[in-house]
Amino acid sequence: MIKPFTPELIYIEPRALEYEQGRMLYDKFKDTDVEIRETTSHNQVRGLPGENDFQKYRVAKNTLVIGVRKTLKFDTSKPSAEYAIPLATGCMGHCHYCYLQTTLGSKPYIRTYVNLEEIFDQAHSYIKERGTELTRFEAACTSDIVGMDHLTHSLKQAINYMGEQENGRLRFVTKFHFVDHLLDAEHNGHTRFRFSINADYVIKYFEPGTSPLDKRLEAAKKVAEAGYPLGFIVAPIYVHEGWEQGYYHMFEKLYDQLKDVNYDEEDLTFELIQHRFTKPAKRVIEKNYPKTKLEMNEEERKYKWGRYGIGKYVYETDVQERLKETISAYAKEFFPASTISYFT
Ligand code: SF4
């Protein structure tokens, strides 16, 4: 059974203690066995234990860095939201395919930001800028925020905050089931709670350190009962022996969990994302997870030109079509009123 994340090592910026959230986190750990070190900047954590990159990477994934978010300009987060709201960076999960391995590079440690009021004020000015149009914020662009929120409750505060914003909406996705503290948040229907789900094979071989499917689905049921708008991201959709049955079985289990829940199926969304990789990502994956079974054979894929000149390898067109049709048909079979937001 996967346990909620507890860091093995903590770094804190002294400035973080000027904030209530920083003091709360410091107090939580100061009398425990977890070592707390100071760092001048959450962007430059030095001296992580480990004799080589492989060990350091694993230590970093268990290290929590408590800092002040200085850059308050939010990144955009198209197409599912207007902005990424920066509550945290990094993740304790070990998904082999995770893009954070390349985007975070040498800084895979987990950063949580304590200046929440400043972050919410910034969100508020973005909402105001767009007038009466809804402004959506994605909270899981650079982390799996649910995986650490039992410690920080910063996501919960963001949910409560967005619940009060007439034109603000929040969304995030998770592979963790530690949702109990979020069930009584005052979301006011303004937060879409999404779970990342997959066939058993993919979870078993490529998603170590995350919650098993059954746990995610039980959590989804609780979230639906708590009245949150609900969604699922099926990603990465990955071709493997018996994938049709694997994904069908996943939908069967999902249906079983939700069938007795009184929720709005018309508001249920599915986002479908096929497996892809870039050449730089492949190199990093092979370094961090040298024994991975993840298939990344360029010859069997289609090259798709991307931004910044880094293209990605997706499935061949005919395979893509089959994936899209098959998974969409399953979603519609079990949840006919739901929406398939996109396949990419
Ligand atoms: Fe990456 Fe999400 Fe897996 Fe964390 S849970 S390692 S963010 S894919």
Image (cartoon, grey):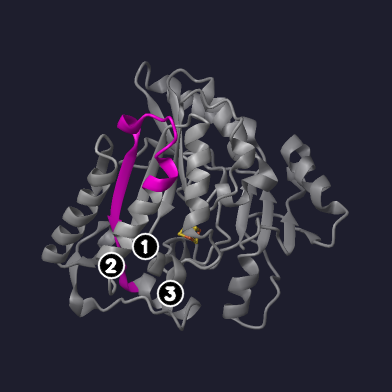
Residue at point 79% right, 41% down?
Answer: 23
Q: Which residue is mark 3?
A: 285
Return the disc, 2 or 3, that comes first in the chain's sequence: 2
Report which quarter residue 64 is drawn in: bottom right
What's the residue type where badge 3 is placed?
Ile
What's the residue type where badge 1 is placed?
Ala
How many numbered badges does the structure rendering display?
A: 3
Report which quarter residue 249 is drawn in: bottom left
Residue at point 55% right, 31% down?
Answer: 159
Kindly indicate whether the residue at mark 2 contacts the one at mark 1 (C-beta within 8 angstroms). Answer: yes
Where residue 234 sits: x, y (%)? Answer: 34, 53
Q: Which residue is mark 1?
A: 199
Relative to 223, say whether 290 is above or below. Answer: below
Where residue 86 sits: x, y (%)? Answer: 53, 42
Where residue 123 sits: x, y (%)? Answer: 50, 29
Residue extent of the magenta highlight: 255-279
For disc 1, does the CB lie below 8 Å from ligand 1?
no
Residue at point 77% right, 48% down?
Answer: 14
Where residue 95 sits: x, y (%)? Answer: 47, 66
From the viewer's perspective, is 157 left or right of 175? right
Return the disc, 3 or 1, that comes first in the chain's sequence: 1
**In front of the other: label 3 or label 1?**
1
Q: In whole angstroms, how far apart are the C-alphas of marks 1 and 2?
A: 7 Å
Q: Secondary structure at mark 3?
A: helix
Q: In whole angstroms, how far apart are the C-alphas of marks 3 and 1?
A: 21 Å
Report which quarter residue 184 is drawn in: top right
Bin the neighbour count of mark 1 within 10 Å (Cα to Cα): few under 14, some 14-19, many 20 and up.
many
Residue 344 appearing in the image = no
Q: Nearer the viewer, residue 39 or 163?
A: 163
Q: Which residue is mark 2?
A: 243
